[in-house]
Image (tube, rainbow, N blue to C red):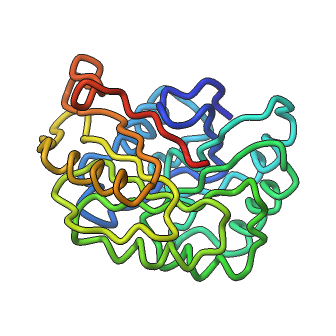
Amino acid sequence: MARGSKIEWTEATWNPVTGCSKFSKGCEHCYAERLCKRLKAMGNRKYENGFIPTAHPETLNEPLGWKQPKMIFVVSMGDLFHEDISDSFIIQVFETMNKAYWHTFQVLTKRAERLLSISEKVDWTHNIWAGVTVECADYKHRIDLLKRVPSKVRFVSMEPLIGGIGFVELRKVHWVIAGGESGPGSRSLDPRWIREIRDQCVRQEVAFFFKQWGGFNKKANGRILDGQTWNQLPV
């Protein structure tokens, strides 16, 4: 488990699964793929398979040993719901989250169909949040699938935002994260896309978190939107 995550909207990461494969347009410049390959080259045994989807049973109990309550992003280095990860292993991940009731777990995926399918087989205790990534209007259907997941908190990550989203019915969604793509080859973010999302969140009374403008040097570009830092969290 990584304590003190650099991801602005969480506090820690837990990776019982690593690796993934390209699934939609937002995957083109995947940061996790670059990092996994780098860690493999450095000799990190956990990443000996590079970016091939891999389950790590030896990490299942990690959150149980972390006694200080944390906001934990689950599988920041891949996708828990990748088709190569078995239902039985995903269920074990949920069982750990059920036991670690003092933590809050943020489960995010692009594979909304499998998220919904698995949701009927697991216990959505109060401390598990469900989220889907929607990087442009082509994938708004994932939000409709998310709304059917019986989690206490449902959230949408519009990052990397690579196109306008248009109107979104956010009923049953509690939180929206938005941000531009960063790193080598990153695609530019049109401020109009972000403002449209923010304004819809304000009108529909949904918490809004603006993560970054992105770009090759995301720190230099910052995360100020119209003179304000948007750090809202779901109530």
Residue 179, percent across and down? 30, 42
Front one among 148 and 53: 148
The structure residue drawn at horizontal position 87% and vertical position 35%, both measured from the top left corner, is 65
User: Residue 219: horizontal and vertical position, in percent?
Assistant: 29, 19
Instruction: Decide: is 20 above or below 232.
Output: below
Q: Residue at image x 55%, y 67%?
A: 81
Q: Is residue 198 left or right of residue 48?
A: left
Q: Looking at the image, which residue is at 38% across and 45% down?
A: 33
Outermost residue to the top: 220
Query: Is the residue 113 above or below the residue 175 in the image?
Result: below
* 23 with respect to 128 (left or right): left
State the count of labels. 0
Q: Quadrant of the N terminus?
A: top right
Which is more toward the observer, 67 or 209?
A: 209
Residue occupying image coordinates x 59% and y 56%: 107
* Residue 48, percent from left and from top: 54, 42
Q: Confirm whether residue 183 shows in the render.
A: no
Residue 159 seen: yes
Estimate the x, y position of residue 36 in percent, counting from the top left: 45, 40
Left or right, residue 166 beside residue 118: left
- Residue 20 versus residue 223 in the image, above or below: below
Q: Is residue 129 above or below residue 112?
A: above
Q: Is residue 70 left or right of residue 52?
A: right
Q: Quadrant of residue 25?
A: bottom left
Q: Give the camera-side residue of 34 and 213.
A: 213
Please name whichever residue, 30 or 57, is drawn nearer the observer in this view of the structure: 30
